Amino acid sequence: MKDAPARKLTLSQKVVARLFDFYFRASQGYEAIATEEMMYVFGLKGFMAWGAAVGGTVELLIERYGEAYTQLILGFGGLWNGCRYCAYGHTLVCDLIKFRDEDVLFPLDPIVMRELLDLRDDEVAARISELLADEEWELPRQLLLREFELRMDTAEGETEDDDYLRLALDAWEWMNECTIIVGVDIEPDQVPPLSPIAKDHELLKRYHTARAKERGKA
Amino acid sequence: MVSNGNNFDIVQRSPGRVDVTLRGQWTDADARAYEEALIKAVTEAARTRVLINLSELRNCSLSVRQVLSGVQRKLGEAKCRTAYVANRPRLRSIALWVVHMAEDGEARSVPTQNLAEDWLQGEEDRVTSIRRSTESRLANLRRLRGAK
């Protein structure tokens, strides 16, 4: 792993990290990153607390927004912190779900996210408005722009979504504390979809073919 | 004020407060000059709050990032509290990497000047602050859902 520092862990930390990585690979269909780094930075109890909080956050968000837009919100949680790994991987999950369930190519994908990462924050917000301008994308547009305002601390008033979006932002800041060791430099084609949908290789293949065709037309 | 051409300014705004602006494309030599100047500026005061603005930085190589992280480690050892403010996700990425690798819990990457000032006024460690906030929001939401 590029840039990943070698960390000295206790035996129990090493054992739990290995078990976690093994379980994670089997259940999610892709490799966990930064487990040892989290163990080192958060400690064993902190690592457990982090896992419980992230799991609880995802559960609440899925209950409210469904899986596709939850993943999109998390992808942007990563983007605002500059974690490319989360920005690409979670957005890709949203794309795959939309493609599988609705046969559409969602306007935001890892290649677009790479462009957004280099823009100024106000330019990112403007680009979100532009890319999600169609009426069918009203909900994700509103959610992402509100998430942006909350992250920039410029939100006025309160909406029913604020508690959920703030939770997502905080939980992903906690996450990115350690994923940044990988997420600082990684490229879109190096990041898997960050959910068990990663196991559906056939879907991935069909999706990438459709995206390539779309890009060919553009 | 210490200035190095077009690459950085270091301004002692008041006792215990230093404002830094980094800009342009950096070389390893710029990074080393910055290290020397900033460490000199902060070791002259007892506890310094340092605001580092990266918004005008164009790019920074891995070797420059490593020097910045080394500087941040020294700021941490000197009991400084640091906020990196950057108006692009890419630059916040660099700032987060720098503070993480420096293992300095009193440094944080934020998107706005106001959030930087809030951070500088606080005393809490970065990870503790993020963890407390996440767990408290999660508990509140669960309580609200349970009440419905």
Image: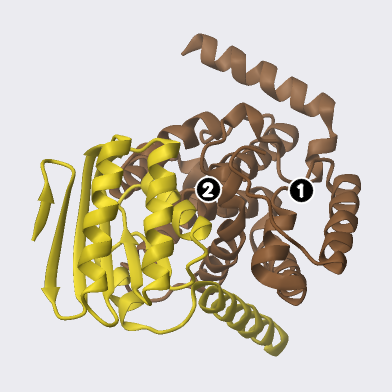
Chain colours: A brown, B yellow
Q: Nearer the viewer, residue A147 or A116?
A: A116
The image quadrant where one finds the N terminus of chain B is: bottom left
The three-letter amino acid code for the residue at tag 2 is Cys
Residue A83: mark: 2
Q: Which residue is at the front of the view, A204 or A3?
A: A3
Disc 2 with disc 1 on a shared chain: yes
For mark 1, name the chain.
A
SS type, badge 1: loop
Which residue: 57% across, 81% down?
B132
Q: Amino acid at mark 1?
A: Ala
* Residue A133, quarter of the rendered image: top left
Front residue of B29/A182: it is B29
Q: Which mark is residue A128?
A: none
| Residue ranking furthest to the top | A216
Quadrant (top left/top right/bottom left/bottom right) for the C terminus of chain B: bottom right
User: CA gap, disc 2 to disc 1?
Assistant: 15 Å
Is A78 drawn above or below residue A130 in the view shown?
below
Horizontal and vertical percent position of residue A213? 60, 12
Residue positioned 38% across, 77% down in the render: B79
Chain of the residue under label 2: A
Residue carrying label 1: A32
Mark 1 closeness class: few <14, some 14–19, many ≥20 residues within 10 Å: some
User: Nearer the N terminus, badge 2 or badge 1?
Assistant: 1
Q: Is residue B63 left or right of residue B115?
A: right
Q: Residue at x 77, y 72 (%)?
A: A44
Q: Is residue A145 visible?
A: no
Count the marks: 2
Q: Are marks 2 and 1 in contact (CB under 8 Å)?
A: no
Q: Splitting the image into 4 quarters, where does residue A123 fall? A: top left
Pointer 2 local density, CA inside 10 Å: few below 14, some 14–19, many at least 20: many
Residue B36 lies, in percent from the top left, at: 26, 54
